[in-house]
Amino acid sequence: MTVSLIELWERFGYYGMQALIVYFMVQRLGFDDSRANLVWSACAALIYVSPAIGGWVGDKILGTKRTMLLGAGILSLGYALMAVPTENTWFMFSALGVIVVGNGLFKPNAGNLVRKIYEGDDSKIDSAFTIYYMAVNVGSTFSMLLTPWIKDYVNAQYGNEFGWHAAFAVCCVGILVGLGNYALMRKSLVHYGSEPDTRPVNKKNLAIVLGLSALSVVASAIILEYEAVARVFVYAAGVAVLAIFFHLIRTSETSERAGLIAALILTVQTVFFFIFYQQMSTSLALFALRNVDWDFQIFGTHLWTWSPAQFQALNPLWIMVLSPILAWSYSWAGRNDKDFSIAAKFALGFAVVAIGFFIYGFAGQFAVNGKTSSWIMIWGYASYSLGELLVSGLGLAMIARYVPARMGGFMMGAYFVASGISQYLGGVVANFASVPKDLVDPLQTLPVYTSLFNKLGIAAVVCTFIALAVLPLMRRLTETHHSHNNAADDGISESAAASLRDVKAEQ
C-alpha cells in the first residue's frame, strides 16, 4: 500500500502535466501544432526509454528504494520548474528533461519494489499489482480532471495566464504528498529492496548518478529543442532495437529462437499500436479543443461542461471499467478451453482501435457549426481503451511468455525503447492534422481532423488483417517454443511471471 500510494501521486503529477502540455505549448507559448506535437512526442519517447536505464541503477548501483525516492524527488523538481511563470522555451525543455530523468529513476524501481515485497507468493503478488495498477488509473483520472479545472479557474480569477503554472504546481504538490506518505510509512518497507539497499549509501556512486542525470537533462533539452536531433535519436534507437533482436535471434540456442521471433513480431505490432495511442495527447487533444462541444447533454438537458483537456480522463476511466470485465472474460475462456492466443488478442485490439477512430472520423456527421457532440469522445475513447487493454496491456505478458528468463530484464528494456520510438512516430502522424495558426473556424478545422481519423481507422484495419495473416506463423512459433520448453521450464515460467508482475504497471 505504501508504494501504491506514492505511485498514485506520481501518476497524478505525470498525467496532470500530460493533459495540459500540448495546449500549453500551443496556447501559451505560441507553438504551431506540428512543433507542439513533435516536442511532446519526443518527450514521451524519452520518458519510455529512460526506465531501461533507471531499473539497472536501482538493481546494481544505488538500491531499489533509494533510486525510487531519488526519482520522485527529481520529478517534484521538474514539475516545480514547470510552475515557474516564464515563456522561455529552453527553460521548459530543461524542466521536461528533469521530468524524463526523474521518471526513468522512479518508474521501474517502484514496480520492482512491489514485486520484492511479495516475492514467492503469487496470489499476493497478483493482488498487490491489482491495487498498484488501480492506483495508476485513480491518480491519472483525478489529475486529468483536476489540473485543467485549476488552470481555467486561476486564469479566470487572476488573469496573466498564471493558471497554467498553478496547475503544474499542483503536479509538484502531488509528488511531495506521495513522498510524505512514504516518510510516514517507511518502516513497513525497511526489510525490502535490492542488495545495495542493505548497505550504506555509496557517496561516489550517488555523485556519479547525479552527474550523469544532469548531463541527461541537458541532452534531453537539446533533443526537444532541435527536431533533427530528435529524429536522429529516435531512428538510431529503432535501428539499435532491431539489431539487438536480430543478434539475439542469430546467436540464441535453437530452443530459444522460435520464442524470440514470436516476440519480435508482436513487438513490431505493439510499435504500430502506440502510434495510435499517441494521438490521445496530440491530434485528439487538439480536436477536443477546436471541434468538440464541451457540454454534455441528454435529450437537450444540460448535465455538465468539461474543459477540453479533461476528455483525456476518459481513457483511465474506461480502463477501470473495462479491466475487470476483460479479466473475467479471460478467466471464463480459460476455464472453458476457449481462450485466444496473445496474437489473436492483438488482432482484436487493432480491430476495436479501428472502430474508435472511425467513430471520431464520423464526428463530422453529427457536428453543428463545426462542433461535434461530446458523446462522440466518450464512445470513441471506449473503443480506443479496449484496444489498449488488448494490445498494450498484453505486450509485457508477451515478452515474459516468449523470451528466455536470462534475457527477460534486457528484453523488457528493449520493449520499452521500441514503445518510446512509436510515441515519436505518433507525433509525426498527428502532424498530418496540423492546423495553421490563422485557421480558427471550426467548419474549416473539422475536416482536417476527421480526414486523419478516418485514415487512422483504415490503417488500424490494415494492421488487423496483417495480425490475422501472421496468426498461422505465430501458432507454429508458439508450438515450437512450447515443445522445446515445456519439459524443463517450471522454474523459468515462475521467473517470467515475476518479471511480468515487476513491470506490468509501467503502462
Image: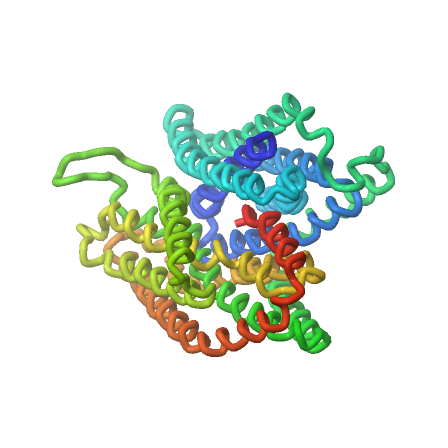
User: On the rendered structure, is 472 left or right of 72?
Assistant: left
- Residue 110 image position (x, y, % from top left): 63, 40
Which quarter of the rendering shows the N terminus? top right
Q: Position of residue 348 (x, y in %)?
A: 37, 64
Location of residue 29 with respect to 339 vertically, above or below:
above
User: How is the model colour-coded?
Assistant: rainbow
Instruction: Tell me what residue is drawn at x 56 percent, y 34 percent.
Output: 4
Q: Is residue 48 above or below residue 141?
A: below
Farthest front residue in view: 487
Q: Nearer the viewer, residue 396 or 432?
A: 396
**Callout count:** 0
**Residue 295 or 259: which is nearer the viewer?**
259
Q: Residue at x 58, y 32 (%)?
A: 6
Is 374 located above or below residue 455 in the figure?
above
User: At 85% across and 36% down in the image, what residue appears?
Assistant: 203
Quarter of the rendering containing residue 362: bottom left
Viewer-proximal residue among 245 and 472: 472
Q: Quadrant of residue 208?
A: top right
Q: Is residue 94 visible?
A: no
Look at the image and tell me whether residue 454 can be seen.
Answer: yes
What x and y, as percent, mark residue 216?
A: 71, 49
Q: Residue at x 57, y 56 (%)?
A: 45
Q: In the rendered view, does 268 fall on the left or right side of 244? A: left
The percent position of residue 339, horizontal first and vertical second, equals: 41, 61
Query: Depth check: 301 or 186 in front?
Result: 186
